[in-house]
Amino acid sequence: MAMRQTPLTCSGHTRPVVDLAFSGITPYGYFLISACKDGKPMLRQGDTGDWIGTFLGHKGAVWGATLNKDATKAATAAADFSAKVWDAVSGDELLTLAHKHIVKSVDFTQDSDYLLTGGQDKLLRIYDLSKPEAEPQVISGHTSGIKKALWSSDDKQILSADDKTVRLWDRNTMTEVKALNVAMSVSSMEYVPEGQILVITYGKTIAFHSAETLEQIKSFEAPATINSASLHPQKECLVAGGEDFKLYKYDYNTGEELESYKGHFGPIHCVRFSPDGELYASGSEDGTLRLWQTTVGKTYGLWKCVIPEEENAEAAKAKTTLPATAEEEIGKALNCQLQICC
């Protein structure tokens, strides 16, 4: 009997959720940050979706959000022409970095000493966070607003995407190494350090490229326009979501569609796998985040798999139940739904 996905729904935002990111695995677990047009990025426990806090200070939509590796710092990019750096433990604002236009993307180096930003002014900026008063290093070359900018190759290179172009830059020389032109507007970009893989989505295409050369490795075509895709840490599968409200799961090696189901009540803007690969998160126009199991029915986080004892072991059916602390149990067995409200 096929197991049915039972997502954890994380409420709290009042506008569309447009970006999300996980931290690395820390002694306290891992964490999830979400960016929303309501201007109030939120921090959650990554494996349960439990709300931890809201970062207050932006005066416009927040388009990008990220956590450093050990989840001690957060950074956000917003429509109020600023990027902010936060203490992710106390929630205090540490820095406001003024820009000349809307900021869309933020990314820490692995040592958290530098912050990369990109936005509508077509410029990449590198801030030395130990010298907040100093002017940032600026890289020009994009011909339209930057949608995403990421460190790559142990922070020696930078990957950035504007409307229909992905560019690879050398950090030391601040020069372009290579440019990749695509047929339609780039909707998302993910960098996977293990294997140096760049995941790009545009139109209905999910493409995988070498992060070092931008040469294409493979690509898949989805049934609908895709806004975001994420590759499993072990490269077993990938997930994608887009305009038809559905989440798609594919076998990375064969391209076979493994699952597809309606994930939200609006277009899906962002999807990401957790650092351990046990779940993935999605953010939507409907204002919610949802957490989904990579292996349905496995006991993990707030999901508990119960297999009843029966005389005929082959007839035993897996049942998914929710913990007593959950707010609401709508159904038993395979079609229950857990709502986490914050």
Image (cartoon, helix red, strand yellow):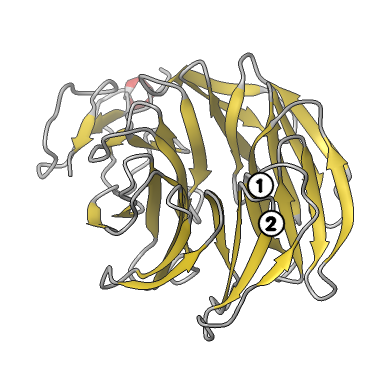
Label 1: few (<14), some or many (≥20) within 10 Å? many
* Residue under label 2: 123
The residue located at (17%, 44%) in the rendering is 342
Query: In the shown orientation, is residue 19 left or right of residue 228?
Result: left
Hey, which residue is sitting farthest front in the picture?
100
* Residue under label 1: 146
Q: Between 43 and 125, which is closer to the camera in this rendering?
A: 125
The residue located at (37%, 39%) in the rendering is 37
Please tell me whether mark 1 sits on a helix, a strand or a loop.
loop
The residue located at (10%, 45%) in the rendering is 325
Amino acid type at circle 2 is Leu
Tell whether label 2 touches label 1 (CB within 8 Å).
Answer: yes
> Looking at the figure, which quarter contains the N terminus?
top left
Tell me which corner region of the image, top left, top right, bottom left or bottom right, holds residue 326.
Answer: top left
Query: In the shown orientation, is residue 198 left or right of residue 311?
Result: right
Hey, which residue is sitting farthest bottom in the picture?
130
Label 2: few (<14), some or many (≥20) within 10 Å? many
Q: Between 167 and 133, which is closer to the camera in this rendering?
A: 133
**Is residue 252 placed above or below 264 in the rendered structure?**
below
